[in-house]
Amino acid sequence: MALYILSGAMAGFGGVMTSSRLASGIPNAGLGFEFEVIVATVLGGTSLLGGEGTVIGMLVGALIVGTLNNGLNLLGVQSFWQTVALGVVLVLAVGLDAAMRRGGGGGLRGRRRQAVVPTETASGATGSAAR
């Protein structure tokens, strides 16, 4: 229950900050922000399947999305194409995450090294073998 109260308080605080920044109460001022948040969290390493992700990763994803939006604004790209670019980035990030899950965690995350333990051979000599 406390989390719902905290979530509502933060949403109210965000609404007050947005209306004070715009100097007016525009009901659809935050339209589309949820898409940018989803892209930022997926870029930050959070799985759409849930259960994984870090705050630091989400902040890195938010920085990437903010940099991408700022760069596209500076280049004079229309807002429609900016949303398309974010959609392409989201599809690529989800595809990369799915490929890494299917491939056993290889790729960018790397694989864990196997421990090498000494073993005895048939002749009694010791050697090493991977577990």
Image (spheres, rainbow, N blue to C red):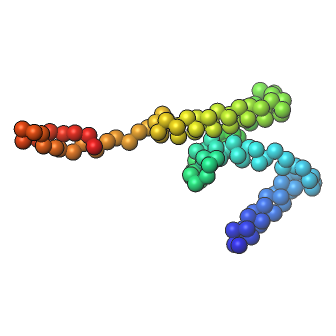
Q: Quadrant of residue 9?
A: bottom right
Q: Look at the image and tell me in which quarter the C terminus lies.
A: top left
Measured from the top left, where is residue 90 in percent x and y? 68, 37
128 sits left or right of 54 in the view: left
Q: Look at the image and tell me in which quarter the N terminus lies.
A: bottom right
Measured from the top left, where is residue 49 in percent x and y? 62, 49
Mark count: 0
Residue positioned 73% across, 68% down in the render: 4
Question: From where the camera sits, is residue 94 visible?
Answer: yes
Q: Does 35 sit above or below residue 10?
A: above
Question: From where the camera sits, is residue 13 visible?
Answer: no
Residue positioned 53% across, 40% down in the render: 101
Taking depth in this image into account, of 92 and 86 the one nearest to the observer is 92
Measured from the top left, where is residue 83 in percent x and y? 78, 35
Residue positioned 60% across, 47% down in the render: 47
Measured from the top left, where is residue 55 in percent x and y? 59, 53
92 sits left or right of 105 in the view: right
Residue ranking furthest to the front: 122
Taking depth in this image into account, of 59 and 128 the one nearest to the observer is 128
Taking depth in this image into account, of 29 and 129 the one nearest to the observer is 129
